Image (tube, rainbow, N blue to C red):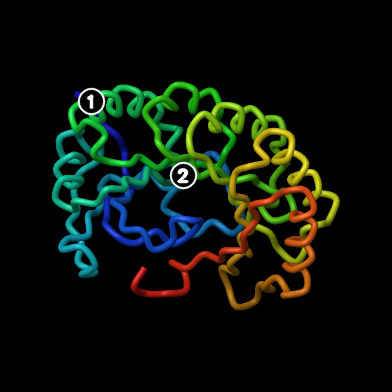
Amino acid sequence: MQEAKLIEIFSSFQGEGPYIGAAMTFIRFQHCAFSCQYCDTPNSFRKLKEYRVEHPQGSGNFEFHSNPASVENIQNWIKKFNNKFISLTGGEPLHHSSFLKNWLPEFNKHHQKKYIILLESSGILYKELEEIIEDIDVVSMDIKLASVTKMRSFWEEHRQFIQIARKKELYIKVVVGEETPHEEWQQAIKLVEQECPYVPLIIQPMTPQSKTENKISHNKLKKLFDIAKQDLSNVRVIPQIHVQAQWL
């Protein structure tokens, strides 16, 4: 029996990207090898003995179950929440590619594509993506800018990830901040233009994790948007809604 270590399973509305407002069942996997300074899921970096399930959905009441979670338990919650979209999120769900490549084909076959599988990923683990791409419907990919993550750049990993992800519906999110230099931003735009100029590029203003952090200014955000629009036709600014609204 295949099992996966989870943080939580819950039903809510998508809070970022072009599917904002769509009802989804979120399966949040443990573990992330990265440490972006703006991360809003600190439990990604903990080894949890239990995962939680919000039930009834939207109630704020949680049941706790032992990790790892079985396929049967995961599928029971998917059925109970009854949303067409299933978001595989984290953490980084591609750290669990061995579980996903065994579970997803059987799940999709059994349900005859009743569900839409959306993968939310850091856009770096391209080898793991290759293993499961045929059973994914939508890829939500990040481009990680060193100016906001405070890590190194991942340009080549992002390029190879895009080359696989563009086989399916793809959109790309890029978190930007006041410190994002135009040279780094232009490199990100060049990458998208070369590999998938037709996909939506979502500019996502960094959400400060404390009151002492500076928000990106309107002028800076407008400048980054204008630069992107020079080479790309589908550019949008969409903040994270779920961190601003309690009902998400």
What is the x, y in percent for residue 183?
A: 85, 50
User: Could you tell me which secondary element the residue under label 2 belongs to?
Assistant: strand
Please identify the quarter of the rendering in which residue 60 is found: bottom left
Tag nearer the camera, 1 or 2: 1
Image vertical order of residue 220 relative to residue 170, above or below? below
* Residue occupying image coordinates x 70% and y 63%: 177
Q: In which quarter of the image is the C terminus?
A: bottom left
Farthest-out residue, bottom:
211
* Residue occupying image coordinates x 31% and y 58%: 23
Say the numbered circle drawn on residue 120: 2
Please identify the quarter of the rendering in which residue 97 is found: top left
Who is closer to the viewer here, 13 or 179? Answer: 13
Say the numbered circle drawn on residue 109: 1
What is the x, y in percent for residue 179?
A: 78, 62
Q: Which amino acid does label 1 sit on?
A: Lys
Q: Residues within 10 Å of mark 1 (few under 14, many from 20)?
A: few
Q: Residues within 10 Å of mark 2 (few under 14, many from 20)?
A: many
* Residue occupying image coordinates x 37% and y 42%: 88
Q: Which amino acid does label 2 sit on?
A: Glu
What is the x, y in percent for residue 41?
A: 45, 56
Q: Marks 1 and 2, Cα distance to the nearest angstrom?
A: 22 Å
Q: In which quarter of the image is the N terminus?
A: top left
Determine whether, in the image, residue 74 is placed left or right of residue 218. left
